[in-house]
Amino acid sequence: MRQVWILSVLLFLLIIGIITPRVEGNIERSGVVSWITDGDTFDINYVTYRMADIDAPETYEDYEAYNESKYYLLDLIHGKTVYLDIDDKYTYDIYDRFVCVVYVSHNTTHYLNVNKAMVVANHAITKNYDNEFNPYTWSLFVLKPSTSPTPTLSPPSTPRSYPTPTGGPELFPTAVAVISIISVVVGIAINSYMKKYKK
């Protein structure tokens, strides 16, 4: 009986390890954010980056929403090291800004997908532009790759909490529930099988 449960737990951990969300592409650049233009654009050392597949309010649309979005992004990444997955399809947008998915360290094992965080916090909307990315598959938190670029160190910052996603195709919670059920069913089946042939 004990062997059955150990096998079930190992199976569960194996499957969880396989489906845990990871950084989707490659982290090609990293650097400390020096300027925030608005809720979807920022600079690192005078080079401008546009966050892929999201759209934050502009000043002429809603000045209050623009400010809220800009300062939310400022709180998330300004003065911090960010890790960038640059669009491999076009690299730049029509304004010669690098198009990218932005990650910032959340803890020792996970990055926060900043593009997704802006949408989850209602400071930007999803727009699936023509590039390599698919914003509908993003997870809010992703595992850090085993090898990452050596960043320029930035001063430590106070950890903050982030809202839990309320909608969209978040794979991880559903997958954990399904895998838990499958593990229990497999454990019961193995237990029944062992009892049957033990007699």
Image (cartoon, grey):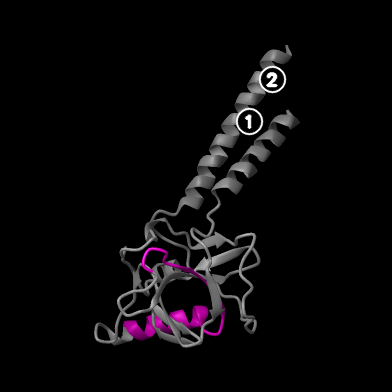
* Residue 187 placement, left or right of 129: right
Instruction: Report which residue position mark 2 lands on.
Output: 194
- 103 is higher (above) or lower (below) than 79: above
What is the crowding at mark 2: few (fewer than 14 residues within 10 Å), some, or many (at least 20)?
few
Q: Which region is colored magenta? A: 65-90
The answer to whether residue 82 is visible is: no
Percent x, y of residue 2:
75, 31
- The tag earlier along the polypeptide, 1 or 2, is 1
- The amino acid at mark 2 is Met
Image mark for residue 113: none
Question: SS for tag 2?
Answer: helix
Farthest residue to the left: give it. Answer: 60
Task: Residue 185: say if magenta.
Answer: no
Amino acid type at mark 1: Gly
Secondary structure of residue under mark 1: helix
Which residue is at 52% across, 44% downward? 177
Q: Position of residue 19 (x, y in %)?
A: 54, 48
Q: Residue at image x 65%, y 35%?
A: 8
Q: Where is residue 13 in the image (x, y as percent from the top left)?
A: 64, 44
Outermost top residue: 199
Res 66 → quadrant: bottom left
In the displayed structure, does residue 33 sit left or right of residue 49? right
Q: In which quarter of the image is the N terminus?
A: top right
In the figure, 9 relative to 195: above or below? below
What residue does disc 1 label? Answer: 187
Residue 70 is situated, as x and y percent measured from the top left of the image, at 40, 83
Q: State which quarter of the image contains the C terminus.
A: top right
* Residue 197 appears in the rendering: yes
